[in-house]
Image: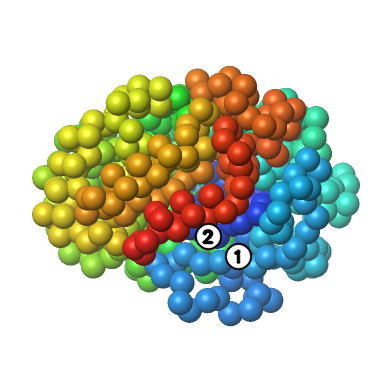
């Protein structure tokens, strides 16, 4: 008979792409589920196929700043349908041999939970699952995460998992465990109260090089290109005190210096959330570094919030500008006017931020968008004390823009999520070539960003 505490293996799969870099990417959802299972007495093992600090990996690049850095990569064949793309395609992450060896050292798991991120990375998920299945043919494998939620039908047919889970899993986690292992427990946390969650199981990594923080979930906006409202339909907040305690924990236990906000709407309702939290960070006088790669809302920035962010130790600020064609933005969102943007640049500069620390994301490759418009946006941002950063648009199912994207694309987006890869700028209407894309990228990155 099995012991009453089953063994659960949690896996972060490989990335397959034309390009990938660890810009502070951690599978925060999977690590939260791992921590919940562990805190309820289950035995857990965690394997990260993207581990940059695997014992067999070459030493990490010392030049990489603030915990970011390159993944190990191995060239692989391009997926069917993207063979004509004139770029190399790679598996990013540890060598398959290391993965197999690590799996072989484990006590056979009773259940495997695997996560997924970008929709177009699903071939990396398939490859990971195929290896897991070959080694543990009798163990059920459940796939969750962003690809599984956004492309559930595709995942059911193609991922190779025994079951697919959609959406946030905290509520259903222990029912799922009971279904597959007959382990039952009374949850000792409240899925609706983020403060009752244990900290993500980052300590199971080979190194805790930075810590992702989700101080709130959900987003009140419904920007036409974004799936946040579909993936996280409810707004939830952590209390500032609980966030501060977590920061202190990672600093004291693992000397972590870099903290990365994953919130979709950190500065929304700032009076109740961001402002008290930033004030507490300042009071703690920690000299830690904070980063916002997932972009802050420009309208949430004013003289006060800009000053608090600076004093709290924010080093890398990203803003969700998306386009500086202010007259046409109603097709995207209604967040920002030209005046808002110029004011924000001024507030950030007055607070002490330098141009290289602040980047404004500009979406490129939106359906119907002309390249000339992208160029105008880059130049408009360059006139301010902010650095433009090009973000290639990835069409996402369940967003308002999806039907337009499907109509505009030179690929059959509905047929295969592989075509939603932002690297191939699938919805660009004008003649596509890498030279034009590189030229725009060059123009945007004229001045370096942190
Ligand atoms: C934080 C974030 C990032 C981080 C990195 C995150 C990471 N892990 O790598 C940063 C800022 C670097 C980033 C970058 C990008 N991102 Co991003 N990002 C997000 C964001 C806001 C949150 C993800 C997250 O951590 N959520 C919090 C955790 C708790 O949730 P979770 O991981 O989903 O896990 C829960 C469930 O999914 C489930 N679950 C997860 N795994 C499993 C497994 C099992 C077995 C089960 C049962 C359940 C389960 O339970 C978990 C707990 O509830 C999402 C939007 C969103 N709100 O989801 C976009 C999102 C994923 N990003 C997106 C995009 C487009 C990008 C970019 C391409 C942007 C660009 N154009 O430049 C880049 C490129 C990324 C790259 N690495 O190359 C898109 C996805 C597009 C797509 N086609 O798939 C999203 C959906 C946003 C959007 N526009 O709609 N991103």
**Residue 132 in picture, x, y percent from top left:** 80, 51
Which residue corresponds to mark 1?
71
Name above or below for residue 439 compared with residue 220. below
Residue at left 46%, top 72%? 64
Cβ of disc 2 within 8 Å of ligand 1?
A: yes
The number of callouts visible is 2
Q: How far apart are the two marked residues, 2 and 1, measured between alpha carbons?
A: 6 Å
Mark with earlier residue (2, 1): 2
Q: Please rate how many residues cluster around mark 1, counting C-alpha atoms within 10 Å: few if below 14, some from 14 to 19, many from 20.
A: many
Query: Where 153 sits versus 162, above or below?
Result: above
Horizontal side of 408 relative to 65 (left or right) equals right
What residue is disc 2 on? 22
Q: Residue at x 55, y 76 (%)?
A: 60
The crowd level at tag 2 (other Cα within 10 Å; few <14, some 14-19, many 20+) is: some
Residue 183 in view? no
Pick the front one: 220 or 380: 380
Residue 407 place in picture, x, y as percent: 62, 22
Q: Residue 361 falls in which quadrant of the image?
A: top left
* Image marks 2 and 1: residues in contact by CB distance under 8 Å: yes
For residue 304, side relative to residue 390 (left or right): left
Q: Quadrant of the C terminus?
A: bottom left
Specify whether tag 1 is near ligand 1 (CB below 8 Å).
no
Q: Look at 63% across and 30% down and name the residue there.
A: 409
Instruction: Work out whether residue 78 can be spotted.
Output: yes
Q: Which mark is residue 449?
A: none
Secondary-structure class at tag 1: loop
Q: Secondary structure at mark 2?
A: loop
Between 437 and 361, the one lying in front of the other is: 437
**Residue occupying image coordinates x 32% and y 37%:** 324
Provide residue 374's location: percent of width, then percent of height.
Answer: 42, 41
């Amino acid at each position: 008979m099995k012991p009453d505490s089953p063994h659960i293996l949690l896996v972060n799969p490989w990335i397959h792409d034309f390009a990938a870099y660890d810009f502070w990417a951690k599978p925060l959802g999977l690590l939260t589920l791992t921590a919940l299972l562990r805190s309820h007495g289950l035995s857990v093992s965690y394997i990260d196929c993207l581990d940059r600090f695997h014992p067999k990996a070459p030493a990490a690049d010392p030049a990489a700043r603030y915990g970011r850095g390159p993944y190990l990569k191995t060239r692989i064949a391009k997926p069917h349908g993207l063979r004509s793309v004139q770029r190399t395609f790679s598996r990013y992450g540890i060598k398959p041999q290391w993965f197999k060896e690590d799996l072989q050292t484990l006590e056979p798991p009773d259940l495997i939970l695997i996560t997924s991120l970008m929709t177009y990375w699903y071939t990396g998920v398939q490859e990971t699952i195929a290896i897991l299945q070959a080694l543990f043919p009798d163990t059920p494998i459940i796939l969750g995460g962003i690809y599984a939620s956004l492309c559930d039908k595709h995942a059911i047919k193609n991922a190779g998992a025994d079951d697919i889970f959609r959406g946030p899993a905290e509520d259903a986690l222990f029912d799922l465990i009971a279904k597959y292992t007959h382990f039952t427990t009374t949850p000792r946390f409240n899925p609706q109260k983020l403060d009752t969650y244990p900290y993500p199981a980052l300590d199971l990594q080979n190194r805790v090089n930075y810590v992702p923080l989700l101080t709130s979930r959900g987003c009140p906006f419904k920007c036409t290109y974004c799936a946040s409202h579909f993936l996280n339909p409810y707004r939830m907040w952590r209390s500032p005190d609980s966030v501060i305690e977590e920061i202190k924990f990672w600093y004291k236990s693992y000397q972590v210096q870099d903290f990365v906000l994953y919130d979709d709407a950190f500065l929304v309702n700032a009076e109740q959330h961001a402002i008290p939290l930033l004030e507490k960070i300042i009071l703690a006088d920690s000299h830690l570094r904070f980063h916002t790669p997932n972009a802050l809302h420009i309208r949430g920035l004013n003289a006060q919030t800009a000053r608090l962010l600076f004093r709290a130790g924010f080093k890398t600020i990203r803003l969700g500008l998306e386009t500086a064609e202010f007259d046409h933005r109603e097709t995207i969102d209604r967040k920002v006017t030209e005046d808002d943007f110029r004011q924000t640049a001024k507030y950030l500069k007055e607070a002490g931020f330098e141009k290289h620390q602040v980047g404004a994301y500009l979406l490129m490759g939106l359906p119907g968008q002309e390249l000339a418009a992208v160029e105008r946006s880059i130049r408009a941002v360059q006139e301010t004390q902010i650095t433009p950063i090009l973000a290639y648009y990835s069409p996402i199912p369940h967003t308002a823009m999806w039907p337009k994207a499907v109509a505009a694309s030179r690929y059959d987006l509905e047929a295969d999520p592989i075509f939603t890869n932002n690297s191939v700028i699938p919805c660009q209407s004008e003649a596509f070539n890498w030279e034009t894309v590189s030229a725009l990228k060059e123009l945007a990155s004229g001045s370096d960003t942190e």
